[in-house]
Every structure is written in structure tokens, then in C-alpha cells.
Image (cartoon, rainbow, N blue to C red):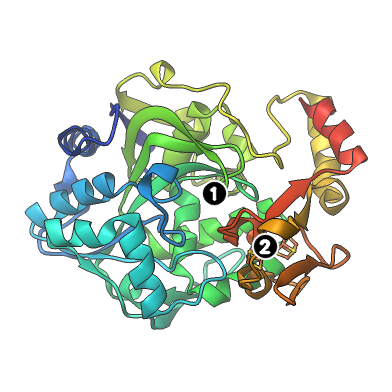
Amino acid sequence: MTQPAGRDATVAVARCDGYDLEEVDAAVRRAVDLVGGIEKFISPGAKILLKPNLLQGQAPERCVTTHPAVVAAVARLLTEHGCQVVIGDSPGAGIVYSEANLRRAYLRAGYAAVAGETGAVLNYDTGSRTISFPEGEAMKQFSIITPAAEADAIVVVSKAKTHMWTRMTGATKNLFGLIPGLEKPVFHFRFQDEYAFGRMLVDLNECMKPRLQIVDAVMAMEGDGPQAGSPRKIGVILAGSDYSAVDTVLARLIGMEPLEIGSIRSAVARGLIDPGAVRTVGDDPLDFAVPDFRKPSTYAGGGAGVWRRVVLAVVQRFGKTYAPRPGVIAPACIGCGKCERICPVHAITVTEGRATIDLSRCIRCYCCHEMCTEHAIALSQGLTGRLLARLLG
Ligand code: SF4
Ligand code: SF4
């Protein structure tokens, strides 16, 4: 097995048992040094967009957002290297990309304090630019938030989480946050299965070419991520330059087959990565693997047997029939309308303070579930779906 020329599939694994600032600092520096040191990726004085998972800004202990200690450690490393660091993201899929929403999200996620401590600047520019990408397979251009378009380089500092739609989110999916908030639902409408969505994510990463990936997998999210899951310790920081290689290591740590992840499969199909050639340096990932990491309730997969692949193909082809359906938990719904705004097919209406879902229109993208901070959207599977889930183990 060989890695395609010009791409480095080396991924550093550095133990980190908690979010003590000194421990995180040491783990981040060790991880980056293991893959060649910061100077290998970033020129001194460069203007950097530091791109965390900011998703609506949640308290760090909920494990929805990249922990501020990790964001701070990477920001410090970059500022010591002489870089100007801007922290930016367009958080969440249906959130209006406004200064007020950014301010609230930064505060909740602990990034306002990070900026104060490290000299990094929080982005409040809510503009965007169109970036052409003629070689894209799924997209020929992207609308990208201004700080990403203006940066000399992008450094991604992502949170390791499960994801109801893409199965997991780490390095590759993080970059979807460069798409301005209310433009995101269009992508869910256009790329209605996770593999098509993965092809788009690979285009986005190839277009923006982030230089360095750091993954906060100290405390990850298992279960119904990226918002409604539970914290689970993995205890590592990952670092590398290749988004698919980093995600390959993360998938294995949480007991998923890398090729089950749409974006990794797309990168393999394009000859951008050979999962068999991904190599780790530093600590042994086997010491941190969590094989019983709880998968999202939409997850179907695991083994590679022929019959299982056939059943999975059927599930993918008729996904809407078998996939869990969203439903509103009436007592929990406060009628905020976030789900109504995010739904790419306008299947949700909020009347008299309560959301209702027209399942005949729903494409099972789970954006509403991701968006609802009240946990008022439940996902349930019909009888056929439950039978298939049992068959697939
Ligand atoms: S289901 Fe959630 S997001 Fe939708 S209106 Fe109710 S509380 Fe808001
Ligand atoms: S109602 Fe269906 S299509 Fe609309 S956001 Fe929810 S899961 Fe997606």
C-alpha cells in the first residue's frame, strides 16, 4: 500500500488525559512536532484562520464545541510563530451568520477568553466571497466566509464527534463551517445522501487546502452527535496535514470502518488517500481505541461481509424508508423556529409556538435534530428500519 504522491498520511497521536492547560499545551506541541513541527506547515508572520467547531456555542463540558483549552494551545503555538490568528466559523447549519450570534457563540464556547489570553482575534466579519474550483467533482465554486478567503492558511482545530448524517465529524466535515450559515441547507438539499455529501466535502477541502489539522479527541461525543450525544473519553490529540488520513485514524479509534465515512470513501475513489498507507507516530492508537464507542442511532454498518454490504446498499438506495424519522417532542418545543429555518425542503412549520413536521417532504438530513438546542426533536425508526438495524448489528 502506498500513499499518493505529494500527500503525507502521517498522523500524530499524543496522549492527553484532560483539559488542564499545561497538559493540553504539551500534547498539542508534541503532536505538531511529531508530524514535522509548525514551521513545516506555516510561514512565520502568516495570517491564519483558526477554524474550530463552534456549533451555536455550547459549554465546553458538553463536548459539542472544540474545547477552548485546545483552541488556546493551537493559537499560542501560532502566535509564538509570529502569526496573526483569527478565530472564525459560521456556526451551525441554520443559524443566521450575524455579529450578535457570533458574539453569543464565542462567549458560550469560551473563545472570548481564548482571544484575551492568546492575542488571537475573533472574527465578526459576516461577509463571504465566491471561490472558483473548476477541478471540483461535485462543486465548481463555493461561497466562503471572508476570514477564510483572506487567510494565508487555514488551521483546523476540530472536535471528535459522532454525526447523525455523516456518521462522524472530525477534520473533513469541520470545513463545512466555511459556508455561510443560511447557505448550508441548500447543500443538504442538493447532496441528499451521505456519500454525495462526502464528495462535496472533499471538494471543499481540496479547494481550501487547510494546512494543518488538530483534533480534540480528549473528550469526544458519542451517540447522537453532533449536538445531542454524550461525552466519552478517548484521551488523545491528533495532528496531521491530510484531512482524510486524520479522519481515518479517528474512525478507527471510535470503532468505525474508514470506508463507511462518505468523505473518506470519496477521497479514496479519487486516489487522494490509501487508508492502508496511513501511519501513526507518537503513542499507539490501540491504547486509546474505544471499540464500544456508542454510534449514532442512524448508524448502520460495521463489518465488511458481502451480505452486509448488499443490505447497506439497499438501505442507502431506499434510505428514506428505513432511516429514522424526526418527530417533535411537544412539551420540549419552545417554538423558536430554528428547525423551520434550517429545513432544506421546508418540511417544518411552527405555528402557535410548536413545530410540526411533514414527513412526506422530509429527506432525513437531521439538520433539525442538530439545530434544536431544546432536544425537542426525537428520531425514531419504523419496524422495517428496526429489523434492518438488527440485521446489520
Ligand atoms: S423543535 Fe426545537 S428548534 Fe424547532 S421550534 Fe421547537 S424548540 Fe425550536
Ligand atoms: S424535517 Fe427532515 S428534511 Fe427537514 S431538517 Fe428535519 S430531517 Fe431534514
Q: Amino acid type of disc 2?
A: Cys
Q: Amino acid type of disc 1?
A: Pro
Residue sitting at 24 percent across and 62 percent down? 112
| Image quadrant occupied by the C terminus | top right
Residue at the limit of the structure toward the top, as seen here: 287
- Dividing the picture into quarters, in which one does residue 350 lie? bottom right
Residue sitting at 8 percent across and 59 percent down? 82
Query: Disc 2 and disc 1: Cα gap in Å?
Result: 19 Å
Please indicate whether residue 188 sits to the left or right of residue 24 in the image.
Answer: right
Vertical order, 141 against 257 (above or below): below
In the rendered image, residue 309, in percent from the top left (x then y), is placed at 79, 32
Secondary element at image label 1 = loop
Which is in the foreground here, disc 2 or disc 1?
A: 2
Residue 333: assigned label? 2
Residue 47: assigned label? none
Residue 226: assigned label? 1
In front of the other: 209 or 247: 247
Residue sitting at 73 percent across and 35 percent down? 300
Vertical order, 235 against 186 (above or below): above
In the rendered image, residue 48, in percent from the top left (x then y), is placed at 23, 63
Residue sitting at 61 percent across and 37 percent down? 259
Determine whether the beta carbon of the residue marked 2 sits less than 8 angstroms from the nearest atom of ligand 1: yes
In the rendered image, residue 199, in percent from the top left (x then y), is placed at 60, 56
The answer to whether residue 278 of the structure is visible from this angle is yes
The answer to whether residue 366 of the structure is visible from this angle is no
- Dividing the picture into quarters, in which one does residue 196 lie? bottom right
Sort mark 1 into few (<14), some (14-19) or many (20+) by Cα contacts within 10 Å.
many
